[in-house]
Image (cartoon, rainbow, N blue to C red):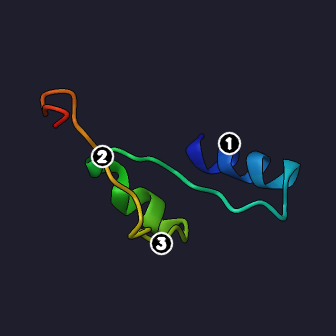
Amino acid sequence: MGREILKFTRSLAPEARLFLFAAEDAEPFYQKLGFKPHEHCYQLKPEEQLR
C-alpha cells in the first residue's frame, strides 16, 4: 500500500522533490524504494526539551 501511495503522489507532481519523514523502524522500507537519507533534517522528540 505504501508503494502505491508514493507512486500516486509522484504521478500528481512528477517534477516535485519528495521529502519523507519516516519512523526509524521504517527506514529500510523507504531506502528499498529508492529514497536517500537527507542530511539537512533535524528532529526534536516529544520527550526532549526545547532550549
> Are the two marked residues, 2 and 3, in contact with CB atoms closer than 8 angstroms?
no
Q: Marks 3/1: CA distance?
A: 18 Å
Q: Amino acid at mark 2?
A: Gln
Callout 3, which amino acid? Lys
Q: Which residue is mark 1?
A: 5
User: Could you tell me how many numbered marks the image carries?
Assistant: 3
Q: Is residue 9 left or right of residue 50?
A: right
Q: Going from the N terminus, do you reach mark 1 or mark 2 first?
A: 1
Residue with the mark numbered 3: 36
Task: For marks 3 and 1, give the one nearer the viewer.
Answer: 3
Q: Residue 17 versus residue 34: which sits nearer the camera?
A: 17
Q: Residues within 10 Å of mark 2 (few under 14, many from 20)?
A: few
Which mark sits nearer the N-terminus, 2 or 3? Answer: 3
Q: Quadrant of the C terminus?
A: top left
Local SS, label 3: loop
Callout 1 secondary element: helix
- Badge number at residue 43: 2
